[in-house]
């Protein structure tokens, strides 16, 4: 069953602004991952954060993980129009080796 | 990065026919591949886990006789939608995890859009 819930469902911002998306989950995890999907395309892996990590950076992306609250956030700084896409969190439940469960996704629109 | 190729990218078929979708890992071996279904503006729903050399594991509510999965080699898994009906119209996406990686990122195909008339 889907266990990730994301908010907001949709986010519209201006180019240059920061975008923050949140994800909550219900069970223990081995890691949490964020993916991006352009309309009608496959998913692209953005970043993975392990359960013993609290924050991770990759370029303009910053991910935080709070296992006590079972939540994660994805921050995209200095957004660009090309960042327009759907963003999904996915949990890799503990014990490892199980299949990823995806959240409902956030549709981000960055207006030029 | 690792590449997963999915074919065909789109297919239109008549109701009652069967459609086969292929998922190939091009530059790595994958003992496990996953098949997802995605409706417009919705998340991915895991249909089944495809295991090389053994039977697929289907999620609850997914008919195994309707969605046949064959993982014949370490680089190829196929999903066959049998006797397709209009309600089977959807976006089907496969993903693969590299051999030796118990946990970690998945590599996704570009998806196959099935339209059943």
Image: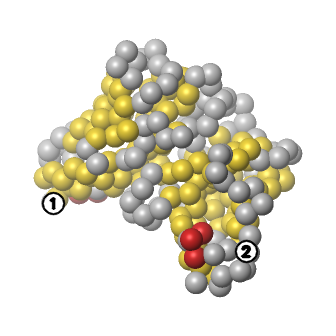
Identify the image quadrant of the N terminus of chain B: top right
Residue B32 appears anywhere in the view: yes
Q: Quadrant of residue B52?
A: top right
Q: Residue at x 47, y 49 (%)?
A: A44
Across and down, in percent, residue B116 comes to 59, 79
Chain letter for mark 2, please: B
Nearer to us in this view, B21 or A59: B21
Q: Quadrant of residue B53?
A: top right
State the residue at coordinates (54%, 23%). Answer: A30
Which residue extends farthest front? B61
Find disc 1 in the rendering and name its residue.
Answer: A112
Judged by depth in the image, the label closer to the viewer, 2 or 1, is: 2
In the rendered structure, the residue with mark 1 lies on which chain? A
Describe the element under mark 2 as helix, strand or loop: loop
Q: Residue at x 37, y 47 (%)?
A: A105
Mark 2–mark 1 Cα distance, whole angstroms, equals 46 Å
Residue B59 vs residue A50, the one in the foreground: B59
> Does residue B61 appear left or right of residue A19 in this picture?
right
Q: How many marks?
A: 2
Picture coordinates of residue A51 (x, y %)? 47, 19
Name the one closer to the observer, A3 or B20: A3
User: Residue at horizontal 77%, vertical 47%?
Assistant: B56
**Residue B68: x percent and y percent?**
76, 60
Q: Quadrant of the C terminus of chain B?
A: bottom right
Is residue A38 shown left or right of residue B101?
left
Residue B20 versus residue A103 in the image, above or below: below
Q: Secondary structure at mark 1?
A: loop
Circle 2 sits on which residue? B83
Mark 1 is surrounded, within 10 Å at the Cα level, by few (under 14), some (14 to 19) or many (20 or more) other residues, namely: few
Residue B47, given in percent of the width and then of the height, sits at 63, 51
Which label belongs to residue B86?
Answer: none
Q: Give above or below for B113 relative to A93.
A: below
């Amino acid at each position: 069953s889907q266990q990730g819930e994301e908010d907001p469902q949709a986010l519209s911002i201006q180019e240059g602004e920061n975008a923050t998306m949140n994800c909550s989950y219900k069970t223990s995890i081995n890691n949490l991952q964020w993916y991006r999907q352009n309309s009608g395309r496959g998913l692209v892996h953005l970043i993975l954060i392990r359960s013993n990590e609290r924050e991770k950076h990759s370029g303009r992306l910053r991910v935080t993980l709070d296992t006590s609250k079972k939540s994660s956030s994805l921050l995209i700084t200095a957004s660009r129009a090309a960042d327009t896409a759907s963003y999904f969190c996915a949990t890799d439940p503990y014990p490892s080796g199980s299949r990823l469960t995806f959240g409902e996704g956030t549709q981000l629109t960055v207006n030029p | 990065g690792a590449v997963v190729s999915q074919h065909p990218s789109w297919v239109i078929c008549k109701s009652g026919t069967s459609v086969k979708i292929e998922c190939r890992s091009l530059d790595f071996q994958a003992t496990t591949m996953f098949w997802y279904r995605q409706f417009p503006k919705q998340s991915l729903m895991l249909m089944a886990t495809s295991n090389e050399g053994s039977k697929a594991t289907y999620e609850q509510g997914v008919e195994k006789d309707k969605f046949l999965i064959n993982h014949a080699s370490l680089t190829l898994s196929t999903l066959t939608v049998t006797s397709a009906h209009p309600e089977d119209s959807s976006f089907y996406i496969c993903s693969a995890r590299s051999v030796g990686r118990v946990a970690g990122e998945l590599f996704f195909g570009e998806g196959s859009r099935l339209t059943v008339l």
